[in-house]
Amino acid sequence: MSEEKKVSRRGWIKYAGAGVVVVAAAAGAGYYATLPKPTPTPTPTTPTPTPTPTPTPTPKPKKLVVWGRASYAPAQQYWANDVFRRWADERGIGIEITWIPVADCAPKMAAAVAAGTPPDVVIGGTPYMIYAERGLLAPVTDIVNKLGRDDIYDIKLRQGTWDGETYAISSGFELTWLHVRKDFAEKAGVTKLFPFKTVDDLYEASKKMTGIEKDVYGVGIPLGGSGFDCGWTFHEFFYGFGGKYATGRSSAEVVIGKEPNRSAAKKALQVLKKIYDEKWTPPDSGEWTDISNNLAYLGGKVAMTSNPMSIWYAIMTGKPELVPKTMLVPDLFPIDLGDEACFVFKGANQDLGKELILKFFEDKEAYRKGWCAQSFWYNLPIFKSQMNAISKEWKEGKYPYWGIDPAEAVSRALTVDPILPPIGVVDSWYRGWGVNDMVVRAVVKGEDPDKVIDSVQKTLEDAMLKEYKK
């Protein structure tokens, strides 16, 4: 407020002695009466400043942090990047996309979760069930329903579902295929054995193709201490023989050391050990990593090996001379290695994250062509409608390298590696090279398989107690 104005009056008294004062008092009375009142002089004041309005800040656009699992096929990432950036532009938000090498996915995610800075969304990544169990993931059941639950293969729904909610949507099938050198098989007289119907068929083909040409081994089996190929190779036989690791989330439900699962594990280890001891696989197989069997096949060192379509991709893009010499047939016990999936961490951006996942899948034909076909079918679509489209093309002769209708191959998959139904503790143990350690000990080092299985049983029991408190 302004200060109240004050009036200052001037004195008119002059003194020149006592007489002057008396005269002034007597004669000046009337004079004073006729004078106008002096005009007050206002005291200068400082005006109160008018407050400057505080501008309303413009909200910064939200930024979605997206991590993806990088594959060997860059075209997959290019397609996804385009889909995501177009969506972000339409929604007026920022987006940061990072593609992470396969081997770095689990440790990088674990570090981010521990630091409290996980990504908003993960595309085609792993692991996820351990985070769902800990309450860190947002359910995506509503996205499944929007995409059409009935159009998604049941095995793909089950891999991301726990306690009635879906927390992860598989980004695709990743089937194992037996890659066979047709010229070697014909020369050895074993073509009629494919696809294998028994373990004895595998033994016979491996034996007869070993040495069919100089320095050629009948089969390439990864048996090294690191790399997922060793683990899932064991799983093909373990699950093929009816084995299970656990039936639930408690120490009492760990069953690999109990019958009939113990026998299934021993039988699987015995198959691998026979191939290794008979030297039907290269002697350095005990040191192989994920890329080793690929290189052995591409280099003509092995006559056959099991693998997803990454070997075929390498043939199509860099070794065209092997195209007419290679046939792809189902494994004896085919499994789906497509455990990678799309999921959302809980947080301020979780609804946007779910929207992004919907965008990834909702144009199903674009997903089939952009994500699946461009990888030369390293991933096959999770949608029945899109597998039917591929099946139709196969029947029309478009994919002569497949020795079986791919839709039928999908239906043969026994399980999703590493475990179905998903259990976070078993998944984490697998990713810490637990299976590799078992295989190296029992197959390469020749330790007593029963003692090795006992140690796995104990390790998983302890892990269950630690994580689930029971």
Image: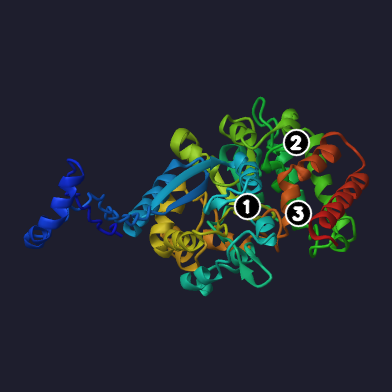
Percent position of residue 447, x then y: 90, 38
Task: Answer with mark 3 or mark 1, whichever residue precedes in sequence.
Answer: 1
Is residue 435 among what the camera can see?
yes
Asked if marks 2 and 3 touch (Cβ < 8 Å), the reply is: no
Is the residue marked by circle 2 packed among few (<14), some (14-19), or many (20+) residues within 10 Å?
many
Check disc 2 and give the amino acid type.
Gly
The circle drawn on residue 426 is 3
Percent position of residue 256, x then y: 85, 56
Task: Answer with mark 1 or mark 2, whichever residue precedes in sequence.
Answer: 2
> Could you say whether the residue bearing mark 1 is in a helix, strand or loop?
loop
Q: Which residue is mark 2?
A: 225
**Tag count in the figure?**
3
Q: How is the image coloured?
A: rainbow
Percent position of residue 103, x then y: 62, 39
Closer to viewer: mark 3 or mark 1: 3
Closer to viewer: mark 2 or mark 3: 3
Which quadrant holds the C terminus? bottom right
Q: Is residue 53 left or right of residue 275?
A: left
> Could you say whether the residue bearing mark 2 is in a helix, strand or loop?
loop
Q: Is residue 126 left or right of residue 27?
A: right
Which quadrant holds the N terminus? bottom left
- Taking the spot 28% from the left edge, 59% from the top edge, the residue there is 4
Q: Which residue is mark 1?
A: 337
Task: Answer with mark 2 or mark 3, whichever residue precedes in sequence.
Answer: 2
The residue nearer to you, when weighing 416 against 360, is: 360
Asked if marks 3 and 1 touch (Cβ < 8 Å), the reply is: no
Check disc 1 and give the amino acid type.
Leu
- Taking the spot 80% from the left edge, 64% from the top edge, the residue there is 247
- Please, which residue is most extreme toward the top here? 214
- Taking the spot 19% from the left edge, 41% from the top edge, the residue there is 17
